[in-house]
Every structure is written in structure tokens, then in C-alpha cells.
Image (cartoon, helix red, strand yellow):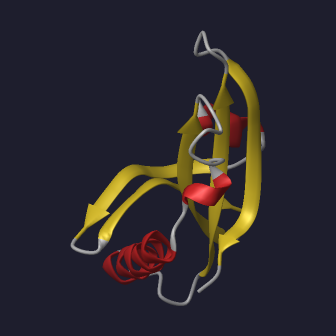
Amino acid sequence: MAVRFLQEKGYVLVATNYRCRWGEVDIVAQEGDDLVFVEVRTRRSVLYGTPEESITAAKARKLVATAQEFLQAHDQVHAGWRIDLIAIRLDGDRRVQDITHLRHAVQE
């Protein structure tokens, strides 16, 4: 769902579920000259917080380290890059209520 959402906005898919020793990132996409590392968070309820609130400081550090590892492994260390968040909210029947794309959700 998140991949399709990004592709409809003109992003080009590079990888999904990229894993390394530092962690995992859900989507790696290209937007123009920039590589975009995308964390996808889905929630059925805000009882335990919103999708946006679910990225802890520890998770943010892992995302940055994972992005940097990807850049090194793919000889892209000089490429522009950022980390975004796709927040998906579902209703009680697991139907999509809302998809929000937050650019620069995690700062290096």
C-alpha cells in the first residue's frame, strides 16, 4: 500500500525491507536526485499513540545507521538522502482511513 502510494507520487522503488546489522528500513525509493528511506507505521487505534509517535529515539538512530549503511553498500555516500514516514491509519474493519506522508520525519 505504501509503495503504491509513493509510486503514484512519482517515486521510483529501489528496495523494500532492506536489512543490515543496524536494523531494517521498509522502503528505499528515489525522488529526483534524492534517495528516500521510508519507515511505514500502521495503527488501528490511537490507544497506544499515533503512528508518528511510535518512532522512538532508538528507532530513529537505527534508521539513520541503516540508511548510512545502504549508502555505503551501494556506493551512494555522496547522494542526497532523507528519512520519511508513511503513517497509515486503519478503521476497526482494517480499511484505510488515512495515509500521511511526513518528509524528513527523522533528522540525521
Q: Percent position (x, y) of residue 66?
A: 38, 73
Work out whether residue 37 can be spotted: yes
| Side of 104 relative to 39 (left or right) | right
Q: Percent position (x, y) of residue 108?
A: 59, 86
Give the residue displayed 60% in from the left and 37% down from the top. 2
Q: Is residue 75 above or below residue 32?
A: below
Q: Is residue 72 above or below residue 105?
A: below
Query: Residue most toward the front?
Result: 47
Q: Percent position (x, y) of residue 106?
A: 62, 73
State which quarter of the image contains the N terminus: top right
Q: Which of 57 and 35 is in front in this view?
A: 57
Q: Which of 96 and 21 is in front in this view?
A: 96
Give the residue displayed 55% in from the left and 45% down from the top. 41
Total marks placed: 0
Q: Nearer the viewer, residue 92 or 103?
A: 92
Q: Percent position (x, y) of residue 46?
A: 65, 39
| Side of 85 relative to 14 (left or right) | right
| Side of 104 relative to 36 (left or right) | right
Q: In this view, does 47 lie above or below 11?
A: above
Q: Nearer the viewer, residue 34 or 22?
A: 22
Give the residue displayed 76% in from the left and 31% down from the top. 98
Give the residue displayed 58% in from the left and 35% down from the top. 43
